[in-house]
Amino acid sequence: MDKPGFLERCDVLCESLSEEEDALTREIVARVADKWSLWTLSVLAGASGPLRFSRVMDQVEGISQKSLTKALRQLERDGLVTRKMFAEVPPRVEYAITPMGVEMLEQVAPLWTWVAKSVGHFQTARSQFDSRD
Amino acid sequence: MDKPGFLERCDVLCESLSEEEDALTREIVARVADKWSLWTLSVLAGASGPLRFSRVMDQVEGISQKSLTKALRQLERDGLVTRKMFAEVPPRVEYAITPMGVEMLEQVAPLWTWVAKSVGHFQTARSQFDSRD
DNA sequence: CAGTATCCAGATCGATACTG
DNA sequence: CAGTATCGATCTGGATACTG
């Protein structure tokens, strides 16, 4: 089995990272896999403009207030969404995706699409595995 | 904010999935984010041939026996690696990546590379966020 | 409205000990 | 060698109640 080119290039890049950068890279990639974070980000991407907290919560079905708050804070912290507070009563907070957030989704979309298209293969593999002696 | 084309295409595909397929898709994508699973898979991809359990464990630094077993089982179940047992004493088990596993890595590599290249941006975003009033 | 604080149940993981 | 079994610490997420 030859070492594939894409893997080699990835290795070279990854090994050039400091330990701190490596840890951060892993963290960001991990966020991609997080159910709520990615869903939240794509809701903001699909909206025609900034969304209030409760509008986001409506669209991310099943999320709790606590989890949404956490997801939005993380996304904000990493510069993937912006948070704008208005000094009104009742309070209004608007979230919007950043260009970096859009870029992130663009990177994730091919992977997601590939998995979705391959879902039949995975189902087959699993049923074979589950019914082996 | 216009709905980007890539997102729309992804939406259309995702909405064509049954609830079961959707759940499986999420699960597979989640595995991508899992530290050990991806690392294990890339070790097998980088090897010049099948690897024994203990060889894999050597290369995935810091993993416990329990976690490696779990990661390998999941990868096997999804058809991303194969497991071959030899009836010898002491027992020998060899793991190898499948074509599907290679494909999976090929899908993940661009994302990983992009994150690694963007790590500086994320560091900046975080330090700004962490030092805001 | 947009959170924060608290409690609690379930999953996860490392360490350790044991086995075919 | 390649696991499985068990235990305890840790983390996570939902439900609920409360607040500026």
Image (cartoon, coloured by chain):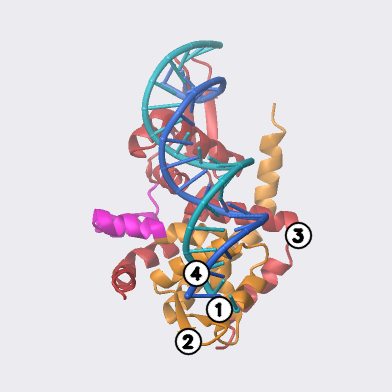
Chain colours: A red, B orange, C blue, D cyan
Camera-side mark, 2 or 1: 2
Relative placement, left or right, of B48 versus A53 is right
Tell which tag, 3 or 1, sits nearer the viewer.
1
A63 on left or right of B129: left
Mark toward the viewer: 3 or 4: 4
Q: Amino acid at mark 4?
A: Leu
Are the residues under marks 2 and 4 on the same chain? yes
Provide the residue designation for mark 1: B45
Q: For the magenta stretch, what is the residue range?
A: B1-27
Closest to the observer, A7 or B122: A7
Disc 3 crowd, CA 10 A, few/some/many (<14, 14-19, 20+): few
**Tag 3–tag 1 contact (CB < 8 Å):** no
Q: Is residue B111 visible?
A: no
What is the chief secondary structure element of the magenta stretch?
helix
Does residue B28 appear anywhere in the picture?
Answer: yes
Query: Is the N terminus of chain A in the top left, top right, bottom left or bottom right quadrant?
Result: bottom right
Give the image location of residue B69, x and y in percent. 52, 67
